[in-house]
Image: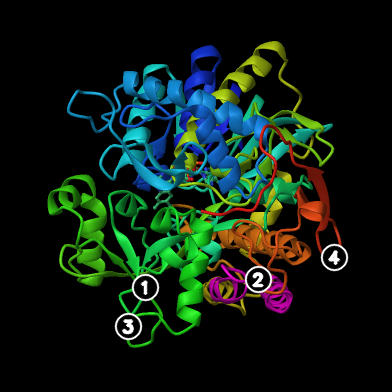
Amino acid sequence: MAQVHEYDSVIVGAGGAGLRAALEAGKRVKTAVVSKLYPTRSHTGAAQGGMCAALANVEDDSWEWHAFDTVKGSDFLADQDAVDIMCNEAVASVLELERMGLPFNRTPEGKIDQRRFGGHTRDHGEAPVKRACYAADRTGHMILQTLYQQCNKYGVEFYDEFFVLDLLMVDGHCSGIVAYEIATGELHIFHAKAVLFATGGYGKMFKITSNAHTLTGDGPGVVYRKGLPLEDMEFFQFHPTGLYRLGILLSEAARGEGAILRNADGERFMERYAPTIKDLAPRDIVSRAEFFEIKEGRGAGPDKDYLLLDLTDVDPEVVEKKLPDITEFARTYLDVDPLKEGVPIVPTAHYAMGGIPTDVNGQVLANHNGDLVPGFYAAGECACVSVHGANRLGTNSLLDIVVFGRRGGIAMAEYASTHKLLKLPEDTERSVQQWLAAICDGPGEESTYEIRSTLQEEMMDKASVLRTDESLSEALEAIDKLRDRFTRTRVKDTCKIFNTELVEHIELGYLLDMAQALVVSAKARTESRGGHYREDHQMREDDHWLKHSFITKVPEGLPQLAYKDVVMGRYEPVERKY
Ligand SMILES: Cc1cc2nc3c(=O)[nH]c(=O)nc-3n(C[C@H](O)[C@H](O)[C@H](O)COP(=O)(O)OP(=O)(O)OC[C@H]3O[C@@H](n4cnc5c(N)ncnc54)[C@H](O)[C@@H]3O)c2cc1C
């Protein structure tokens, strides 16, 4: 029998989005956070470069310029009502974190310091602007520590290393979750008036990625299996500066502080692709440029398969003081000293623009018509509001998680205060029990390790920065085969205590689902927009494709697609020049 816990609000995930939501919910109603990881190990803690807000502490700035950059960066797919909210609330959100004690870097006069980041400009694209607030290159770490302290202060209860496996629904209303306690193998039911998912991204479907091992799309995976839609899954961001072969991130802050990208000939190739803001162009453009440079034979190294991030002209004191972690990464992992030579880099799978569709208060959408799921919320990277559209700007994710985490937390607490606890569904944990039993009882002739690494290679080769109908069809065929092989695996370790084989097996299942949703959505979109670049359809087609995709799993055959109009506002789509 599973243990049953009762709460007003339950938040799944203890990254920046989950903790920011928990802080608001915890101030208002009885709140628990259920997390697969110990909170401060969440991926938010790995975020380096910064969080943007038009504070205008260092240079002239305005939240409208920030909104314009976000919409243009998104290749006009972002919903402009949501973008306005995010950019407008950014300033107060940063100041709020400062008051909670977050140790931001300071200007000589003692204000929060700001630096440049890709795609952030002054006066609608005139020149780069200093908009990113930062704490050295450990901004996410500081956010996570600060929010965790605050949650403890307000009495939020934590269930750490609890792996959420199912969402409980009664007549289309959310009434709780089922979780597996990793330390004991016991099942727990969290019976709640409102649930918020903040489970992060799913970059682990790609071979080269900046994402942590645990970013496997569990939250969107649970939602997808419940027959609810996922939005804009074809849009996955590749960050231009991952360490060669490893994918470990070197923050865009390096280029913000003056580093330059060079090809094998020493050429600053971004001058050709983005003459105005060059190395600080948005990530989709820079990653694509790198792929083209390598394809056309201008890559560096014996295999001509990487480019160089050149920090040698940046003041060594700035490198050591403002970029200490990434300097250390280059030294430790590649034995390269960034002060003396170029660092080998390649595009690395970084950020999921798509996810669980929500309105601007974090409430989950049940379909492309905009109907809502009562009692169910999502925020952060697992959600799609959509503020990032087809391509996210650097430093806009830490902002997104704080702004929409806060709004989601308030909205769920209000919902919980005005609604009763619903009855639990009849078969509460039975289906999960049967599922876990089946996993341990499979034929066991296939290896989950091989399935995972083949998936990562196929996705990297066929569905990453450059795509064609042919490559996506091949990827889909490969995923189908892998899904079939996955049914013939078995978890051999039957121990109940810290059964990481079981956890990783379940995570792989979610990754396979996310990969399928991504490739089916990408194959259907016969245009190029933001992070989705089709070599066989190189133009953006606003007449037909200025819309969000909604993909839904159906009992038989491939998932189905539907589309929803983009919320427009002040900015009409124009050619995206930088
Ligand atoms: C290396 C790196 C550097 C980055 N740098 C920046 C930057 O400088 N600026 C910026 O704006 N963005 C940056 N980003 C992006 C940004 O950090 C993330 O998008 C953001 O932090 C995601 O926050 P989150 O709260 O949504 O998810 P996460 O921080 O990933 O947290 C997810 C949480 O969900 C929990 N969880 C997942 N699955 C389950 C499950 N099944 N059951 C229970 N719990 C579960 C995990 O335990 C975890 O607590 C960076 C990302 C990376 C990878």
Q: Earlier in the sequence, mark 1 or mark 2?
A: 1
Q: Earlier in the sequence, mark 3 or mark 4?
A: 3
Looking at the figure, which quarter contains the N terminus? top right
SS at badge 2:
helix
Per the model, the C-alpha gap separating discs 3 and 1 is 8 Å
Q: Earlier in the sequence, mark 4 or mark 1?
A: 1
SS at badge 1:
strand
Q: Earlier in the sequence, mark 2 or mark 3?
A: 3
Residue 576 sits above or below residue 19 on the image: below
Q: Nearer the viewer, mark 3 or mark 4?
A: 3
Q: Nearer the viewer, mark 1 or mark 2?
A: 1
Front residue of this view, candidates 186 and 475: 475
SS at badge 4:
loop
> Circle 2 is placed at which residue position?
486
> Circle 3 is placed at which residue position?
301
* Image label count: 4
Q: Position of residue 159 (x, y in %)?
A: 47, 34
Per the model, the C-alpha gap separating discs 2 and 4 is 17 Å
> Circle 4 is placed at which residue position?
557
Answer few, some or many: residues within 10 Å of disc 3's Cα (few below 14, many 20 plus, some between 14 and 19). few
Q: Position of residue 509 (x, y in %)?
A: 63, 61
| Res 307 label | 1
Amino acid, disc 4: Gly
Please give left or right for residue 426 compared with residue 121 in the image: right
Looking at the rendering, the stretch of residues picked out in magenta corresponds to 456-485
